[in-house]
Image: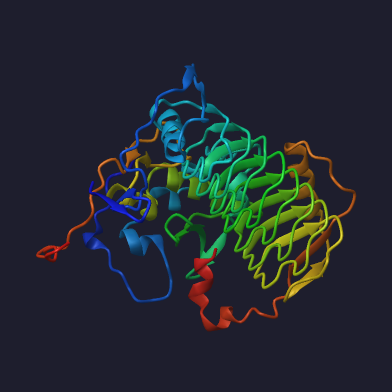
Amino acid sequence: MVAVTAGERGVRYDIRGLAEPDAVAPKIAKIDGDTAGFDAADLSPRQINLELRRLVYGEGIREVTIDNPGAKHSIAVGILTCCRIRINGSLGYFGCGLVDGPEIHITGRVGWSVAENMMSGVVVIDKNAGSLTGAAIRGGDLVIRGHVGARTGIDQKGGTIIVGGNAGATTGFMMQRGRQIICGDAGGGLGDSMYDGSIYVAGKVASLGVDCVEAEMTPADDELIDRKFRIYGMDRPDTFRKFTCGRKLWNYDNLEPSERKLVL
Amino acid sequence: MSEPFDLSSRKLTTRKGIDTEELTGKTFPYQFDRSLVEDIDLAAATPGEDLNWLEDINLMEEDGVPAVFDRYTNAFLKIHFEIPEGRGDEYARKVLIKHLQEGNSYGVWLKHKHAKFPQPSLGSWIADSPTVGESWTPPRLEGWEQPLGH
């Protein structure tokens, strides 16, 4: 693979756009049966991800613990297998993105866009998350026990996002499918331009976005909320209000029928 | 894993429908025989303590035929066997998981040629999946030569 050097800082990348093309897995993890752990304090994000992939893809490890992640960016991305990952500390931005299958527990905070484009799996964050949490997720459970920033679940196409605290402005912006359960308050413009899906809010809603309307809670809604809170050991607020799409902006079913398939 | 698809016999059309049979040029036995998917354990095939991503998979319809949408191919997989009343979503999910576990999803099958990074071929649907993407090389157009100075 050809490597190219570019930019004032001389960052090297290959034709796939991969930075640090010559990096190799540091092989520092301590392996015990099908569990392993390593200290990420002195590793670059690329080295951390290479070590993680070496363990879950190459060594068949099912449980990995990462200590001292140092709020580095883009950690635990693109993991495409069933495994458990525990991250003792906080992550920077774009953590746990593009995953399909893993169950990840982060004991600290996360920056923006955690679990973006998650296809399946479970990501649990014990503290707060930044903006764009769960951007464009298509499936799986994303649980934030603390508060989240703006535009949580923007372009969400499936899956369930659970927020233990408050959610910022424009939560559920352009949401197309899936569910959001917010235990605290929601900022202004909730569900703006959403096409489908459901948002449940236990606290106050500052304002609704364009074409977002309140709907009746059903027994199926309560079953879903009860089940998710039971699984994640969270205290369920007594009452939720449900918000869905008012379907006044639903024009494209008539205009472009095949386009609808592309967002399913 | 199933045999590589022989794409020579497929006939792509310009119609708006997106169907697995059109993309692969073939159908699969579990689209016709319900007994082939009865044993699929949906909870075991998904992460977490419930159905996880399968919660968003429902029985749909394509060309007037019951079908399940395969998000890994962006196409419908038609289901031709009789589905017991009230169990449409369950069988849609079982057919889809069988399709993925057998490596028959067209989008997943394309990984053999196009995956740029080492990864499990069959994702999270099956344990000990073979690895693909270890020896990717950029495609070169036949007869093309790199311009001087590059």
Judged left or right of residue B70, residue B42 is right
Residue B148 or A123: which is nearer the viewer? Answer: B148
Judged left or right of residue A217, residue B147 is left
Number of marks in the rendered image: 0
Judged left or right of residue A185, residue A20 is left
Instruction: Specify the quadrant of the image occupied by residue A122.
Output: top right
Judged left or right of residue B76, residue A145 is right
Residue A160 in sight in this render: yes
Residue found farthest to the left: B143
Residue B32 in sight in this render: no
Q: Quadrant of the C terminus of chain A?
A: bottom right
Residue A207 or B148: which is nearer the viewer? Answer: B148
Q: Is residue A34 above or below residue A237?
A: above
Name the spot of residue B97 as percent of width and height, x first: 49, 45
Q: Is residue A224 above or below residue A187?
A: above
Name the spot of residue A241 as percent of width and height, x first: 84, 60
Instruction: Specify the quadrant of the image occupied by residue A26.
Output: top left
Q: Residue at x 63, y 45 (%)?
A: A110
Q: Residue at x 45, y 61 (%)?
A: B74
Q: Residue at x 67, y 62 (%)?
A: A151
Residue found farthest to the front: A8
Residue found farthest to the top: A32
Q: Is residue A212 above or below residue A36?
A: below
Colour setting: rainbow
Name the spot of residue A253 as percent of width and height, x first: 57, 78
